[in-house]
Image: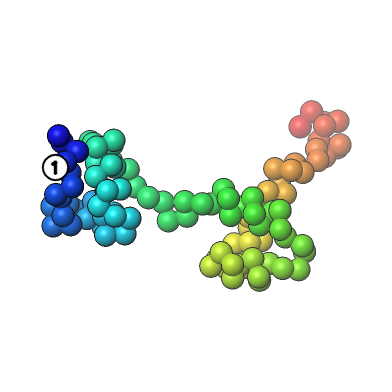
Protein backbone atom coordinates (compact mmCIF):
# COMPACT_ATOMS: atom_id res chain seq x y z
CA UNK A 1 0.00 0.00 0.00
CA UNK A 2 2.78 2.42 0.91
CA UNK A 3 4.47 1.51 -2.37
CA UNK A 4 1.42 2.84 -4.24
CA UNK A 5 1.61 6.15 -2.35
CA UNK A 6 5.28 6.61 -3.29
CA UNK A 7 4.23 6.73 -6.94
CA UNK A 8 2.40 10.00 -6.26
CA UNK A 9 5.47 11.83 -4.92
CA UNK A 10 6.67 14.69 -7.12
CA UNK A 11 9.82 16.82 -7.24
CA UNK A 12 8.05 19.49 -5.22
CA UNK A 13 7.57 16.96 -2.41
CA UNK A 14 11.30 16.31 -2.11
CA UNK A 15 13.10 17.98 0.80
CA UNK A 16 16.35 19.96 0.34
CA UNK A 17 19.20 18.03 -1.25
CA UNK A 18 16.98 15.07 -1.99
CA UNK A 19 15.36 17.23 -4.66
CA UNK A 20 18.77 17.52 -6.35
CA UNK A 21 19.11 13.74 -6.19
CA UNK A 22 15.63 13.31 -7.65
CA UNK A 23 16.35 15.78 -10.45
CA UNK A 24 19.66 14.11 -11.34
CA UNK A 25 18.95 10.44 -10.72
CA UNK A 26 15.18 10.20 -10.65
CA UNK A 27 12.47 10.34 -8.00
CA UNK A 28 12.52 6.57 -7.49
CA UNK A 29 16.23 6.66 -6.58
CA UNK A 30 15.66 9.57 -4.19
CA UNK A 31 12.78 7.73 -2.51
CA UNK A 32 14.89 4.57 -2.17
CA UNK A 33 17.73 6.56 -0.59
CA UNK A 34 15.32 8.18 1.86
CA UNK A 35 13.79 4.83 2.79
CA UNK A 36 17.08 2.96 3.17
CA UNK A 37 19.15 5.70 4.80
CA UNK A 38 16.59 7.74 6.75
CA UNK A 39 18.37 9.80 9.38
CA UNK A 40 21.87 9.16 7.99
CA UNK A 41 23.94 12.19 7.05
CA UNK A 42 26.64 11.76 4.44
CA UNK A 43 28.53 13.84 1.94
CA UNK A 44 29.64 13.10 -1.58
CA UNK A 45 33.39 13.63 -2.00
CA UNK A 46 34.65 15.77 -4.86
CA UNK A 47 37.29 13.21 -5.76
CA UNK A 48 35.24 10.17 -4.94
CA UNK A 49 37.19 8.03 -7.36
CA UNK A 50 40.65 9.03 -6.12
CA UNK A 51 41.75 5.43 -5.50
CA UNK A 52 40.63 4.43 -8.98
CA UNK A 53 42.35 7.47 -10.50
CA UNK A 54 45.61 6.64 -8.72
CA UNK A 55 45.45 2.99 -9.73
CA UNK A 56 44.68 3.90 -13.34
CA UNK A 57 47.49 6.47 -13.53
CA UNK A 58 50.04 4.09 -12.04
CA UNK A 59 48.97 1.28 -14.38
CA UNK A 60 48.90 3.43 -17.49
CA UNK A 61 51.83 5.81 -16.99
CA UNK A 62 54.40 5.22 -19.74
CA UNK A 63 56.98 7.76 -18.67
CA UNK A 64 55.89 10.31 -21.23
CA UNK A 65 52.10 10.55 -21.03
CA UNK A 66 51.55 12.61 -17.85
CA UNK A 67 49.88 15.39 -19.85
CA UNK A 68 47.41 12.99 -21.49
CA UNK A 69 46.57 11.41 -18.13
CA UNK A 70 46.09 14.86 -16.58
CA UNK A 71 43.71 15.87 -19.38
CA UNK A 72 41.81 12.60 -19.09
CA UNK A 73 41.13 13.17 -15.37
CA UNK A 74 40.85 16.95 -15.44
CA UNK A 75 43.79 17.45 -13.08
CA UNK A 76 47.19 19.09 -13.43
CA UNK A 77 50.35 17.31 -14.52
CA UNK A 78 51.71 18.11 -11.08
CA UNK A 79 48.89 16.01 -9.58
CA UNK A 80 49.89 13.11 -11.82
CA UNK A 81 53.51 13.36 -10.70
CA UNK A 82 52.46 13.62 -7.04
CA UNK A 83 50.42 10.44 -7.37
CA UNK A 84 53.35 8.66 -9.01
CA UNK A 85 55.78 9.96 -6.38
CA UNK A 86 53.55 8.88 -3.50
CA UNK A 87 53.03 5.44 -4.98
CA UNK A 88 56.72 4.97 -5.74
CA UNK A 89 57.43 5.59 -2.05
CA UNK A 90 55.03 2.79 -1.13
CA UNK A 91 56.42 0.36 -3.69
CA UNK A 92 60.07 1.19 -3.12
CA UNK A 93 60.61 2.52 0.40
CA UNK A 94 63.84 4.47 0.88
CA UNK A 95 66.75 2.21 1.66
CA UNK A 96 68.27 2.49 5.11
CA UNK A 97 71.54 4.40 5.25
CA UNK A 98 74.21 1.84 6.22
CA UNK A 99 76.13 4.50 8.16
CA UNK A 100 73.07 5.27 10.26
CA UNK A 101 72.54 1.57 10.99
CA UNK A 102 76.16 1.18 12.17
CA UNK A 103 75.79 4.14 14.54
CA UNK A 104 72.52 2.88 15.98
CA UNK A 105 70.42 5.52 14.24
In the rendered view, would you say 94 is above or below 19? above
Q: Quadrant of the C terminus?
A: top right
Please report the residue visible at 19 percent of the width from the left and 38 percent of the height from the top: 3
Residue 45 image offset from top left, x and y in percent: 41, 51
Numbered-mark total: 1
Q: Residues within 10 Å of mark 1 (few under 14, many from 20)?
A: few
Please report the residue visible at 24 percent of the width from the left and 41 percent of the height from the top: 34
Horizontally, is 29 left or right of 78 in the view?
left
Q: Which residue is mark 1?
A: 5
In the foreground, 73 or 19: 19
Horizontally, is 14 left or right of 71 in the view?
left
In the foreground, 98 or 38: 38
Q: Could one spot residue 31 in this view of the protein?
A: yes
Residue 85 image offset from top left, x and y in percent: 68, 54
Quadrant location of residue 46?
bottom left
Q: Quadrant of the N terminus?
A: top left
Please report the residue visible at 74 percent of the width from the left and 43 percent of the height from the top: 91
In the foreground, 6 or 92: 6
Residue 74 image offset from top left, x and y in percent: 53, 67
Amino acid sequence: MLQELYKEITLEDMPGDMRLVAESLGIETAINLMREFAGVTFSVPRLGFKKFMSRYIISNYTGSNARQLALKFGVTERTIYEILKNEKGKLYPPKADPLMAENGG
